[in-house]
Image (cartoon, rainbow, N blue to C red):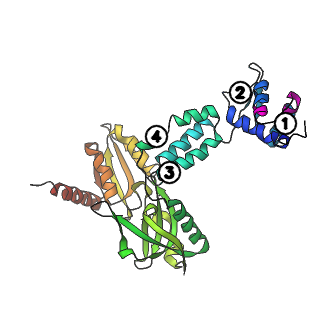
Amino acid sequence: MSNQPNQKLKLLYLLEILLKKTDDCTGLSMNEILGELAARGIDAERKSVCRDFDVLREYGWDVLFDSSTKRWFLAERPFSAEELVMLVDAVQSAPFLTEHMALGLVKKLKRFASESQEERLDQRLDMAEYVKMDNPEVFWSIDAIQQAMYLGRKVQFRYFRFAADGSRVLSRDGRVSEKTPLKLVYVDGLYYLLAYNDRYGGMTPYRVDRMVDVGVSNEAATRNETVATWQLQDDVRLSFGVFGNSPQEPVVFEIDEPRICTVVDKFGKDLDMYPLDDGRAKVYTRAPLCPQFFGWLFQLGPHVKLLGSKRAVEAYRTHLHDIAALYEE
């Protein structure tokens, strides 16, 4: 029996069978396991399979036997069914991935699922309901940016925007930009490069999916006091996106109690909140006085009232006036 050409693969086949055919809800009888091995060209005996299970356990695989059902199964897997669902959902909903990339990643994740788990994952697959990017270079761009940061060099790229007819238009007449990469951040489902701009002496954000021809420059990254001391919170509160990079300022507002969860979701622990007698709450926090923050306030409508600072209230009033002016006849 040991002279069979596939015999050396028996242990690997056993692991494959346990991974794909069993999980914590589904098991196989010994006869079914022997049948699976036979289908792969391997004749085996019960005792030798049990010894192989001992080897797998010794290596760290949680191979268990249910005495009530007389079935063997793999109890603990690299990912639980719930974890695979979360990972697949995250991949599907990530707008920076093209549909082709997302499907490829989901296919790889499904390798960690049993067949029954795979069926449940297939029921969740529906790329049509998500908006996906059409720039397949994102992965390579991220890799090039990280390599530039590791090597201490600038990153070079071209940047594009969309014209009124929906076509891509390269910025700067298609000329290559070279910037010092500070950090890659993931905000609202998109990757951004935060880069030091030598011309302006500050941080500029770039959406990675709108960067093309990304590569590592031969020019060394800028090294000065601004770059050396730069911290993420110095320039941007990520809860309002990387383009909300106005300086952080103290703000105070009152909000209806049913909307307090919205405030906590947005600011996390970075706030002080006090209950008022009328069921509302007064909130003290910091925010950038930018369209992103004002848009967040606006969507809450009459359920929130900005009280301070005076500068924040004036800026918000101007923002609302400019919008209202668009609809004046």
Q: Which residue carries the number 2 mark?
A: 27
Q: Which mark is residue 230?
A: none
Q: How busy is the neighbourhood of tag 4: few (under 14 within 10 Å), some, or many (20 plus)?
A: few
Could you tell whether 87 is left or right of 298 in the image? right
Task: Name the residue located 50 percent from the left edge and 66 percent from the top edge.
Answer: 231
Q: Nearer the viewer, residue 218 or 182?
A: 218
At 71% from the left and 33% from the top, the residue drawn is 75
The amino acid type of the residue labelled 2 equals: Gly
Marker disc for residue 52: 1
| Image: 101 above or below 275 | below
Q: Quick check: can you spot residue 60? A: no
Check contact, mark 4 vs mark 2: CB within 8 A.
no
Q: Quadrant of residue 79?
A: top right
Viewer-proximal residue among 35 and 159: 35
State the residue position of label 3.
100
State how far apart marks 3 and 2 are (Cα): 34 Å
Marked residue nearer the N-terminal end (3 or 4): 3
